[in-house]
């Protein structure tokens, strides 16, 4: 049967009605038409999709350009803002903040565009859109919620108001600025946490690099603002805004080294009342005598440092954990002087005092000395250049009586305090040298108020060996005198952290310490017996005995110790879940030795950081750059 054409408007027939074709059942004309319509519809959809996707891609590309340009402009303006703030140029800083707000708002609008947010859900590339959005939102939050309020806060602060003038610190400007500073610090911390949670390894290189840079920059701002926030919160009450405060000042003598710096031989009481500070009393450690029974201390630390921690105020800082030292010192003072409540403890060393004098200028001491204190050969003016040598060496050569030595130390300390409290010198320079002293561990602070101490614990000034101020991969090398004398003035030290090859999936490190006794070869006869120790503790005259104490990160293990490449005995302990090794070293005049302590099973992957006992040497001369074994990947 011949095929019958199907005319327009006729009903479509079934295969049964049209009959079979030569190749079997032949599709009807209606079916062919339906197929053509369906193909047309699909074609239209494809065309529309191509147009939409192409348009979406173009729009996303446009938004990406906006986001990139505005974030780059923001990065370029930040150094300018920092300079204006440092120069206290409020007008210029406010104008810069206005520009920054414009750029970060535009970047945020691009990064939170509905289509951009939708693209964040795409497989593979979605994480990149999401990360870019987080960076834009973070930048806007930091500038709008932290930067702008901080500019206003800094405008109300005069640097001189943060340093003593005529024996007083003005607290009102700081109290007024504190809420803005705290709020800004909280905003930046939250913003940093948001960026830190982004896994950069899953991103394209074009984004992972800038993200890492943003994290680094924000981390620096975060740390600085956290310090500023703590200071703004702590300074008013600690300076007596709510009533008088009494602080025990420990002046550490680095000639007889201790873990936090030196033996606290000279003591003083500083009183703060509504911003006014004064030296309310002075004394020496020897006047407190021995404590029987000893003051109770942490048993774990007592097992390392013996009960001397609680027996003598001169030994409270055998431990590198300053909160432990401060609590013991407070208890000792209050036991010897009932009714004198101590609200906090401050520690400084001679280098910190010399840094203060570099700003305030020299002080005269001769007129203050009692006639019975011989000062022949000692300088009448103490300067930043001669303070350390005078206090840690010359005094012992020129003043034989230890009690009179203490008098001399007390007078020097009083003169330096008076120069500081009078506000001599540049307030900005004074703030800088104090910041340097804090960073190097030469100034330490503890508060008896648990709320205040909680804030201090997060800062370097706490001197703690555990808690939020301690890096995860933190190592420590500390020194305790074993000579019972003042020979550490002559000891030079370098400390270096060496990363060895990993083993069984764990990192391994070695703390390498080199020590040299630079005392004259005839030290046994040329140096005063008070300096050499006169062999009282079994150490040959002129030699120096030192307990080298090394701390590893939490959960790591001490493995072995060597002195000049030969196996050495070590005491192995644990403190705050950190491994502790103690190695005894003795040096004759002119002798050098290298001590190495190995740590294994280090689980932390963070960059390792090293803390050391501050000495009379520059920190940069003591702590050498980290080293990595050459055959390790």
Image (spheres, grey):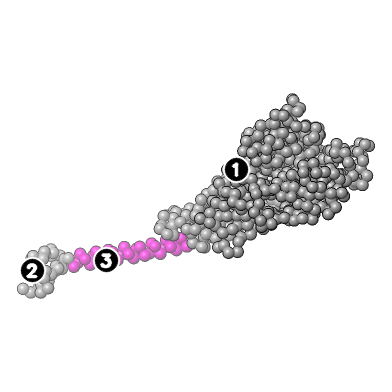
Depth check, mark 1 against mark 2: the one in front is: 1
Say whether disc 1 or disc 3 marks the residue closer to the N-terminus. Answer: 3
Say whether disc 1 or disc 2 marks the residue closer to the N-terminus. Answer: 2
Callout 2 crowding tier (Cα within 10 Å): few <14, some 14–19, many ≥20: some
Residue 157 image offset from top left, x and y in percent: 71, 43
Q: Main secondary structure of the magenta part?
A: helix
Range of residues picked out in magenta? 32-61
Q: For this rendering, which residue is in front, 346 or 503?
A: 503
Q: For this rendering, which residue is in front, 303 or 48?
A: 303
Depth check, mark 2 against mark 3: the one in front is: 2
Which mark, residue 40?
Answer: 3
Q: The C terminus appears in which quarter of the rendering?
A: bottom right
- The residue that disc 1 covers is 574
Residue 77 appears in the picture as rendered: no
Please give the name of the residue rendered at 41% of the width and 57% of the height, measured from the top-left corner.
122
Please give the name of the residue rendered at 55% of the width and 55% of the height, measured from the top-left corner.
507
Residue that lies at the very extreme toward the top in this rendered image = 339
Please give the name of the residue rendered at 16% of the width and 66% of the height, measured from the top-left corner.
30
Asked if the stretch drawn in magenta spans residue 50, the answer is yes
400 displayed left or right of 169: right
- The residue that disc 2 covers is 19
Residue 503 image offset from top left, x and y in percent: 53, 56
Q: Element under label 1?
A: strand
């Amino acid at each position: 049967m011949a095929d019958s054409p199907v005319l327009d408007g006729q009903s479509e027939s079934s295969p049964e009605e049209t009959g079979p074709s030569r190749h079997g059942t032949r599709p009807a004309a209606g079916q062919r038409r339906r197929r053509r319509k369906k193909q047309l519809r699909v074609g239209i959809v494809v065309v529309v999709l191509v147009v939409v996707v192409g348009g979406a891609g173009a729009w996303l590309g446009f938004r990406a350009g906006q986001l990139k340009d505005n974030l780059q402009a923001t990065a370029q303006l930040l150094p300018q803002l920092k300079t204006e703030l440092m120069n206290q140029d409020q007008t210029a800083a406010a104008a810069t903040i206005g520009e920054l707000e414009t750029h970060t708002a535009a970047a945020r609008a691009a990064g939170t565009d509905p289509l951009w947010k939708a693209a964040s859900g795409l497989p593979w590339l979605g994480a990149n859109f999401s990360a870019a959005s987080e960076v834009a939102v973070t930048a806007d939050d930091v500038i709008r919620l932290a930067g702008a309020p901080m500019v206003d806060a800094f405008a109300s602060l005069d640097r001189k108001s943060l340093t003593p003038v005529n024996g007083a610190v003005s607290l009102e400007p700081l109290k007024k600025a504190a809420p803005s500073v705290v709020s800004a610090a909280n905003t930046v911390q939250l913003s940093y946490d948001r960026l830190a949670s982004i896994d950069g390894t899953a991103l394209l290189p074009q984004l992972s690099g800038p993200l890492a840079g943003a994290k680094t920059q924000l981390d620096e701002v975060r740390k600085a603002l956290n310090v500023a926030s703590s200071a703004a919160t702590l300074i008013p009450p600690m300076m007596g805004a709510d009533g008088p405060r009494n602080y025990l000042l420990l002046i550490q003598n680095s000639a007889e080294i201790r873990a936090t710096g030196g033996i606290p031989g000279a003591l003083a009481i500083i009183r703060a009342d509504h911003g006014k500070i004064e030296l309310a009393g002075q004394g020496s450690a020897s006047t407190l005598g021995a404590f029987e029974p000893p003051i109770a201390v942490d048993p774990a630390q007592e097992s390392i440092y013996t009960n001397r921690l609680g027996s003598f105020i001169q030994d409270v800082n055998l431990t590198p954990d300053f909160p432990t030292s401060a609590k013991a010192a407070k208890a000792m003072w209050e036991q010897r002087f009932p009714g004198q409540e101590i609200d906090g403890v401050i520690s400084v060393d001679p280098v910190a005092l010399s840094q203060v004098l570099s700003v305030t200028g020299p002080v005269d001491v001769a007129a203050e000395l009692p006639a019975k204190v011989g000062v022949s050969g000692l300088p009448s003016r103490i300067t930043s250049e001669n303070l350390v040598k005078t206090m840690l060496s010359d005094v012992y050569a020129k003043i034989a009586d230890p009690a009179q030595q203490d008098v001399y130390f007390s007078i020097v300390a009083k003169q330096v305090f008076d120069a500081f409290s009078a506000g001599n010198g540049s307030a900005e320079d004074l703030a800088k040298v104090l910041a340097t002293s804090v960073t190097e561990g030469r100034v330490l602070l503890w508060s008896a108020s648990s709320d205040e101490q909680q804030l201090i614990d997060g800062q370097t000034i706490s001197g703690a060996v555990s808690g939020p101020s301690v890096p995860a991969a933190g190592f420590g090398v500390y020194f305790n005198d074993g000579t019972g004398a003042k020979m550490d003035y002559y000891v030079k030290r370098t400390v270096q952290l060496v990363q060895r090859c990993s083993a069984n999936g764990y990192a391994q490190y070695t703390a390498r310490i080199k020590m040299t006794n630079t005392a004259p070869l005839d030290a046994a006869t040329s140096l005063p017996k008070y300096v050499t120790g006169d062999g009282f503790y079994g150490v040959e005259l002129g030699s120096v005995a030192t307990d080298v104490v090394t701390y590893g990160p939490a959960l790591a293990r001490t493995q072995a110790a060597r002195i000049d490449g030969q196996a050495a005995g070590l005491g192995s302990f644990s403190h705050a879940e950190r491994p502790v090794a103690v190695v005894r070293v003795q040096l004759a005049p002119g002798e050098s030795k290298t001590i190495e302590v190995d740590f294994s099973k280090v689980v932390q992957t963070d960059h390792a950081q090293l803390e050391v006992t501050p000495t009379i040497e520059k920190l940069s001369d003591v702590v050498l750059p980290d080293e990595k074994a050459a055959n390790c990947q």
